[in-house]
Amino acid sequence: MAILENIWALGPRRDQAFRRIACLLLAVALSVPAVHGQRSASEEELKAAFIFRFLNFIEWPENTFEKEDDPIIVGLLGESPMEKELDKALSGKYVQERPLQLKLGATAEALKDCQVVFIAESASEELAAVLEQLKGAPIVTVSDLPDFARKGGMIQLFRADNKVRFDINMDSVKSAKIKISSRLIQLASSILSAEDTVQESASRS
């Protein structure tokens, strides 16, 4: 309470202070601990937790859902250890007052009713075709494949300095009429465009 009272006393500067605190809280929320109890979390656990937390900061087009209680469906394309971890991360959870659901698929066509699709390494050879099939659809494409964002994927997860980080291709996001919160964008390592230009995120400054 003392912190909030001090911020309120800042007058015209308080909005900026609130924004900084909001970004700090989001950074903490996305900082999945490497240790869970006495056990180190696997990379798949960390990435599944990131995907779950991303859902709070994504807005899909208005006509994406037919009913108010329609689930947010996270698809997994290909075989991957992520299946088990995504199931644990999503099972029984709600985001934006919608239940979460995991769907497995062997093709992009089978996952076109999803709101998020994670593309596993086993589907890497078909990546170009998969991204072309999902292009323009209101589906957030996520993967940990090398250069995924540069090739047109929306969010690329990767490990650096023993932490899970992510890049965002904003051109791909905008072409699907999807909105990503500026608070999440500020935490990205890099923001990429279709022309492969990279702007260092404010989180690195």
Image (cartoon, rainbow, N blue to C red):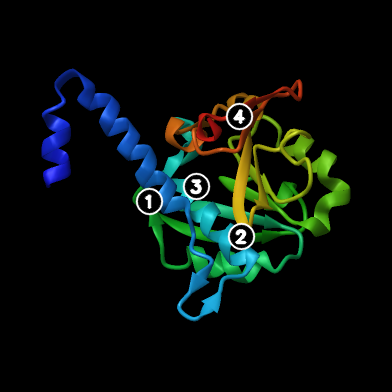
Camera-nearest residue between 73 and 51: 51
**Mark 2 or mark 3, which is nearer to you?**
3
Task: Report x, y in % for residue 150.
Answer: 76, 33
Q: How far apart in space, not on screen, are marks 2 and 4 (Cα)?
A: 21 Å
The residue pinned by badge 4 equals 176
The residue pinned by badge 1 equals 69
Instruction: Residue type at mark 3: give it.
Output: Phe
Q: Earlier in the sequence, mark 3 or mark 4?
A: 3
Dot label at residue 103: 2
Assign a secondary structure to mark 4: loop
Q: How far apart in space, not on screen, are marks 3 and 4 (Cα)?
A: 17 Å
Which residue is drawn at the image coordinates 56% and 30% (left, top)? 201
Q: Earlier in the sequence, mark 2 or mark 4?
A: 2
Q: Is residue 166 above or below residue 20?
A: below
Q: Earlier in the sequence, mark 1 or mark 2?
A: 1
> Residues at badges 1 and 2 in contact (C-beta under 8 Å)?
no
Which residue is drawn at the image coordinates 56% and 38% (left, top)? 188
Task: Report x, y in % for residue 3.
Answer: 17, 43
The local crowd at label 1, few if under 14, some if 14 to 19, many if 20 or more residues have their Cα within 10 Å, is few
| Residue reaching furthest to the right | 125
Q: How far apart in space, not on screen, are marks 1 and 3 (Cα)?
A: 19 Å
Residue 169 placement: quadrant: top right
Q: How far apart in space, not on screen, are marks 1 and 4 (Cα)?
A: 22 Å
Q: Earlier in the sequence, mark 2 or mark 3?
A: 3
The residue pinned by badge 3 equals 54
Residue 26 placement: quadrant: top left
